[in-house]
């Protein structure tokens, strides 16, 4: 029975892989990812190419995602995982893990801990292979991993103008892995005699894909001050903004993508050799009102969709006026540093009373098929957002 689950996975991969991996183009990957990620088409094109490079094994496709909180970094990572799950040919690549950057450094010893990263990858690989995986099956699954490291911006080599040794240790350790290092990783696996014994895996990290992400909030402030400094020769761009109520105003908007230079990252505290290991540095867009409205109405995990599922249990259909959705998105857009997360806060204030006591809200209407209906109106949104 040695490697029974791993063997079945290999057979499943062989049976389902009707196309060579090279035939699944970046355009097709993009179309899959776009189903779950709204408003970040430019970033998704880079991500799609990176995934294609990884699964075909020709060249590394490591990428660095930079974007304010709530713009979709974690959403992109989750949808890469969904892509691996939904495309049969990607079965061997499903050992994907997301880990926080600060977990990879031992603060007391100032030591990079790749074993913690490999342990997270192993856990995911074993979930795919089953409990009786052989050493070779484990090695192959782990070497095909996609590793997502979140909050890498918190490991800058400079904090508050002072050197940060932890940041240097992390960046130096990660760049070594991204270059392609052979890591001796101790674990246990089924051996030729059918017994599970301690083994040491020789893992080549050059076959792994690394996606690092962070909000880099201080970077936004740093570049903004550089651009708006008198005599900089640069100026913010003016945009005509139409409000949900139809009014038009002119605003100057700062977008990091318009002004970022590679030297800004070095000044921020990112080690040049670390940055050089990324195939692309991808800046996520700040979310516009139209995108936030689409996320509210269409995203599976949006607060409106989740609340609609909640009311469905009670036999109530939850609806929202188009203008109400636009007003919520407009209010969320003002919180550019929290992005789509602001939708949850604003929508929660509106819907909480209805969720608590729909019968006592005096807003229930008779709907079709004997079901009742609740409608979120523009007036309800205005009362909350004006408070």
Image: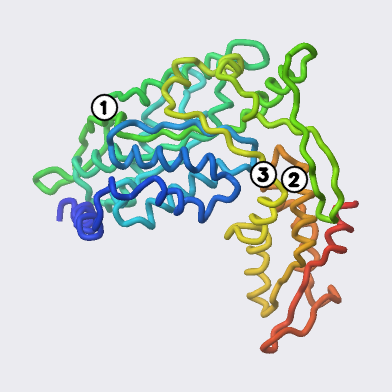
Mark 1 element type = strand
Q: Quadrant of the N terminus?
A: bottom left
Mark 2: few/some/many CA within 10 Å (<14, 14-19, 20+)? many
Give residue 262's position: percent from left, percent from top. Answer: 55, 19
Could you tell whether 297 is left or right of 384 in the image?
A: left
What separation in Å lies between label 3 and label 1 (alpha carbons)? 43 Å
- How many numbered discs? 3
- Residue at horizontal 71 percent and vertical 24 percent from the top: 221
Q: Which residue is mark 3?
A: 287
Mark 3 element type = loop
Could you tell whether 382 is left or right of 30 in the image?
A: right
Where residue 8 sits, quadrant-wise, is: bottom left
Give residue 103's position: percent from left, percent from top. Answer: 49, 31
Contact check, label 3 and label 2, Cβ < 8 Å: yes
Q: Which residue is mark 1?
A: 184
Sequence-wise first label, 3 or 1? 1
Sequence-wise first label, 2 or 1? 1
Which label belongs to residue 206? Answer: none
């Amino acid at each position: 029975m040695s490697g029974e689950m791993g063997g079945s996975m290999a057979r499943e991969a062989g049976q389902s892989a009707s196309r060579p991996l090279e035939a699944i183009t970046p355009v097709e990957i993009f179309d899959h990812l776009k189903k779950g990620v709204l408003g970040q088409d430019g970033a998704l094109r880079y991500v799609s190419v990176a995934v294609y490079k990884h699964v075909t094994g020709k060249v590394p496709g490591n990428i660095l995602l930079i974007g304010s909180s709530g713009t979709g970094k974690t959403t992109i990572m989750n949808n890469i995982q969904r892509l691996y799950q939904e495309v049969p040919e990607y079965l061997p690549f499903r050992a994907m893990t997301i880990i926080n950057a600060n977990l990879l450094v031992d603060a007391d010893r100032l030591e990079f801990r790749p074993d913690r990263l490999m342990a997270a990858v192993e856990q995911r690989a074993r979930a795919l292979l089953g409990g009786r995986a052989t050493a070779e099956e484990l090695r192959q699954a782990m070497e095909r991993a996609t590793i997502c490291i979140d909050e890498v911006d918190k490991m800058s080599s400079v904090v508050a103008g002072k050197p940060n040794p932890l940041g240097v240790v992390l960046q130096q350790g990660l760049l070594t892995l991204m270059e392609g290092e052979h890591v001796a990783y101790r674990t246990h696996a089924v051996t030729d005699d059918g017994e599970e014994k301690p083994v040491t895996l020789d893992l080549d990290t050059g076959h792994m894909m690394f996606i690092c992400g962070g909000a880099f909030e201080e970077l936004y402030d740093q570049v903004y001050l550089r651009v708006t400094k008198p005599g900089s020769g640069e100026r913010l761009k003016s945009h005509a903004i139409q409000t949900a109520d139809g009014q038009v105003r002119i605003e100057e908007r700062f977008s990091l993508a318009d002004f970022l230079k590679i030297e800004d990252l070095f000044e921020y505290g990112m080690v040049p050799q670390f940055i050089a290991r990324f195939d692309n540095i991808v800046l996520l867009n700040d979310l516009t009102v139209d995108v936030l409205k689409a996320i509210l109405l269409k995203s599976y995990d949006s607060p409106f969709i989740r609340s609609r599922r909640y009311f469905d249990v009670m036999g109530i259909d939850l609806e929202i006026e188009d203008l109400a959705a636009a007003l919520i998105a407009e209010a969320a857009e003002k919180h550019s540093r929290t992005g789509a997360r602001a939708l949850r806060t604003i929508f929660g204030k509106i819907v909480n009373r209805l969720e608590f006591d729909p019968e006592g809200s005096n807003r229930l209407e008779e709907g079709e098929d004997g079901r009742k209906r609740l409608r979120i109106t523009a007036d309800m949104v205005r009362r909350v957002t004006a408070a």
